[in-house]
Image (tube, helix red, strand yellow):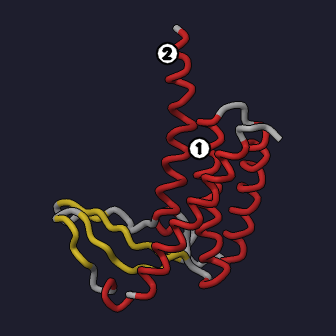
Amino acid sequence: MKIFILPGLTTVLIAVFVDQVTKFFVMDNASSFATGIQILPIFDLVYVQNDGVSFGMFGGMPWWGLSALALVICTVLGVMLFRSDNHIEAVALGAIIGGALGNVADRFRFQAVTDFLSFHIAGLYWPAFNLADVFVVCGVGVLLLYPLRSARCQA
């Protein structure tokens, strides 16, 4: 087993754990979050059940279909993780896999994903999201930006 796999697998576990703990807290306090709790003038905590994917796309699609697709993608990313040859790529893949699995866990239990982070400005609202989504976006961002950094450092 390559040594690079361990940071990636650790990231998977951390992402799933952090995501599920925060969603448990929100669901356990759903009545408080139902109308939203303002944290900053541009940021609220809310309670939303999303049966779609990003931005509510594919809402109404069977939960098991979205879960199956996510698991197929996680399998492909898992193969990439096991083939990874550096820590940065392994951690980024682990973040994506962990975030996706966190949302799949919600779909299996509730047939929807719990979202609770809501940003807005001047009456315009970004769709609510959760920490699983944050892990996925950050992982993808690192995978996209890391090769640029590596190329610049070699020049």
Q: Residues within 10 Å of mark 1 (few under 14, many from 20)?
A: many
Residue 26: % across, % down:
41, 80
- Disc 1: which residue: 92
Question: Height in image: 4 above or below 36?
Answer: above
For residue 155, which numbered disc appears in the image?
none
Amino acid type at circle 2 is Arg
List x then y, in percent, for residue 80: 75, 42
Give the answer, above or below, for where 62 lies relative to 150: below
Front-lying residue, 51 or 58? 51
Give the SS element for disc 1.
Answer: helix
Lower sequence index among marks 1 and 2: 1
Hey, what amino acid is under mark 1?
Ala
Compare residues 73 and 102 and report the one nearer the observer.
Answer: 102
The image shows residue 56, relative to residue 139, as above or below, that is below
- Looking at the picture, does residue 117 appear above or below residue 29? above
Work out which residue is located at the far top of the displayed protein and give it: 155
Q: Position of residue 93 (x, y in %)?
A: 64, 46
* Distance from Cα at disc 1 to Cα at disc 2: 20 Å
Question: Given the current orientation, which residue lies at the most extreme right position?
Answer: 1
Q: Residue at x 21, y 73 (%)?
A: 38
Q: Is residue 45 visible?
A: yes
Q: Find disc 2 in the rendering and name its residue.
A: 152
- Quadrant in which the N terminus appears: top right
